[in-house]
Image (cartoon, rainbow, N blue to C red):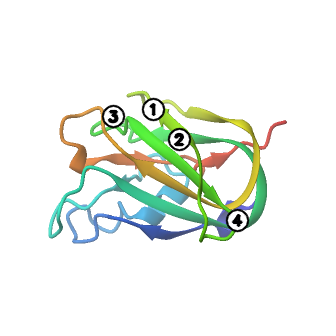
Amino acid sequence: MRKSTWTAIDFSTQEDQGGEGDTRRAADILDGDKSVYYHSCRSGCTATSSYHISIDMGQSFKMYGFRFTQRQTISRAVKDIKLQISSDISHWESVGNFVLQRASDDQDINLSEPKAFRYFKFIAKSAHDVESRSLKLLVHNSILVKSFK
């Protein structure tokens, strides 16, 4: 699976008003660099308590799970998430609600059964910190879809 063809095709918020420089945008979760992370909008926008990012993998793959990595400083770490998948971007199927730990290590989320899909949506619902408007997340190796069987 070549992650170089993956793209962030939809997001509800991102920091693009210059408050974080040239990084911290939705597409930055795909580069695999743990020092670069996504940041929800914090200036020039209306803060929301949740946000989402949708990814197009370019083609359908059979997947077993996802791998997330929080921002390395653990500041504003994401806690409660929902994951959805789609084959056509019009009809979304929830694969569950999950809890991420407040830790800088990779965190694996296993699907209850393998699923084939092209698109997936990450929905951050709450943070470990009180101020959920500044949720930050790095998805190491692009929300790695596990290839093991």
Q: What's the distance in space between the residues labelled 1 and 3, CA to CA?
A: 11 Å
Q: What's the distance in space between the residues labelled 4 and 2, CA to CA?
A: 22 Å
Give how far across and how far down residue 81 sits, in percent. Answer: 44, 42
Q: Are marks 3 and 2 in contact (CB under 8 Å)?
A: no
Residue pointed to by mark 2: 68
Give how far across and how far down residue 17 sits, in percent. Answer: 22, 71
Q: Are marks 4 and 2 in contact (CB under 8 Å)?
A: no
**Residue 20 sits in which quadrant?**
bottom left
Give the crowd class for mark 2: few <14, some 14-19, many >=20 residues within 10 Å.
many
Q: Are marks 3 and 4 in contact (CB under 8 Å)?
A: no
Image position of 132 (left or right of 9): left
**Number of the label disc, if any, that sits on residue 87:** 4
Q: Which amino acid does label 3 sit on?
A: Ile
Give how far across and how far down residue 146 sits, in percent. Answer: 72, 42
In which quadrant of the rendered image does the C terminus lie? Answer: top right
Give how far across and how far down residue 92 sits, in percent. Answer: 59, 60
Q: What's the distance in space between the residues labelled 3 and 2, CA to CA?
A: 13 Å
Kindly state the secondary structure of the residue where label 3 is placed.
Answer: loop
User: In the figure, 149 relative to 85: above or below?
Assistant: above
Kindly state the secondary structure of the residue where label 1 is placed.
Answer: loop
**Number of the label disc, if any, that sits on residue 100:** 1
Give the crowd class for mark 1: few <14, some 14-19, many >=20 residues within 10 Å.
some
